[in-house]
Amino acid sequence: MKQSYSAEPDEEKEMTFWEHLDELRGTLWRIIIAILVTSIVAFAFKEVLFDDIILAPKSKTFITYRAFCKLGEWFSMPSLCIDPSQFQLININLAGQFTSHMNISLVAGLIIALPYVLWELWRFIKPGLNDQEIISSRGAVTIISLLFIVGVLFSYFIVAPLMINFLGGYAVSAAVSNQIALTSYVSSITLMTLLMGLLFELPVLILFLTKIGIVSPRFLRKYRKHTMIGILVIAGIITPSPDVFSQLIVALPLYALFEISVAISSRMYRKKQDQIS
């Protein structure tokens, strides 16, 4: 009589290096396909992508400019009424408009597909985590996605309009008119949007650095004043307008992010100390 042996469950088998490589390859392919699909969809809606989104901050009817005008009326600050239509967008390259369309579609595709991309990466690294790490990082995909989207929206509705208004209307002489290349305009908007999206991931970065012991709440509090100065410098670079009000609009949310990061770091640090004791 032959003795039967039960097969070991797949989840208990340790994957080999090549199996990990195959799994990573599959994950990357799914991510690439997702970004390509969302980029193609964005490419198909050219009018919405450009007229309603990318070029909207160039119109004085943009919601941000109307809100600033309302604030200007309430606080008797007419300078807050901004008219960004002080320059003309031109295309000077044969393939300039097509390449701009392609680039914006890829960026839009990446932003739209980001939650799925993060979920695929999470699904890949999840088997290597223990139960406690899985519980601690639950909801990480949602939080990271939300922070990035909030950063993108903050850049689009606040930072980009201020940047366009100042740089688009800046002149060294009345004899020189501003005619901005489409590629320059598009690259400035997309770069600023992606940078702000990444900057809003600061709480997640601080959480990770606290967990691995590189930073501590005491360290963050010690350099709080230095951070405030750094944030003001960043706000001055992002919004080169000499208007203090515009710089504060950018600086205050960034400082709020820092204080949230300090609070998150303190909570993580206390958890680590409780586990040690």
Image (spheres, grey):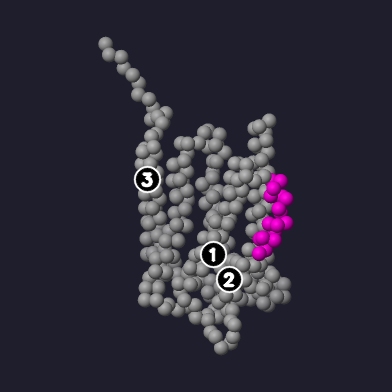
Please provide percent x and percent y for residue 114: 47, 53
Gap in angstroms between the C-alphas marked 3 and 2: 40 Å
Query: Looking at the image, which residue is at 47% across and 36% down?
Result: 128
Query: Looking at the image, which residue is at 67% across and 73% down?
Result: 242
Please provide percent x and percent y for residue 11: 41, 31
Per the image, is 178 magenta? no
* Label pair 2/1, CB-CB below 8 angstroms: yes
Which residue position holds label 3? 25
Upstream in the sequence, badge 3 or badge 2? 3
Query: Looking at the image, which residue is at 63% across and 76% down?
Result: 81
Upstream in the sequence, badge 2 or badge 1? 2
Q: Residue furthest bottom?
A: 175
Which residue position holds label 2? 163
Quadrant hosting residue 249 = bottom right
Q: Secondary structure at mark 1?
A: helix
Q: Which segment did they paint magenta?
A: 217-233
Which numbered disc covers residue 192?
Answer: 1
Quadrant hosting residue 230 = bottom right
Q: Quadrant of the N terminus?
A: top left
Per the image, is 231 magenta? yes
The residue carrying pointer 3 sits among few (fewer than 14), some (14 to 19) or many (20 or more) residues within 10 Å by Cα, namely: few
Kind of residue indicated by mark 1: Met
Task: Determine if residue 67 is in view.
Answer: no
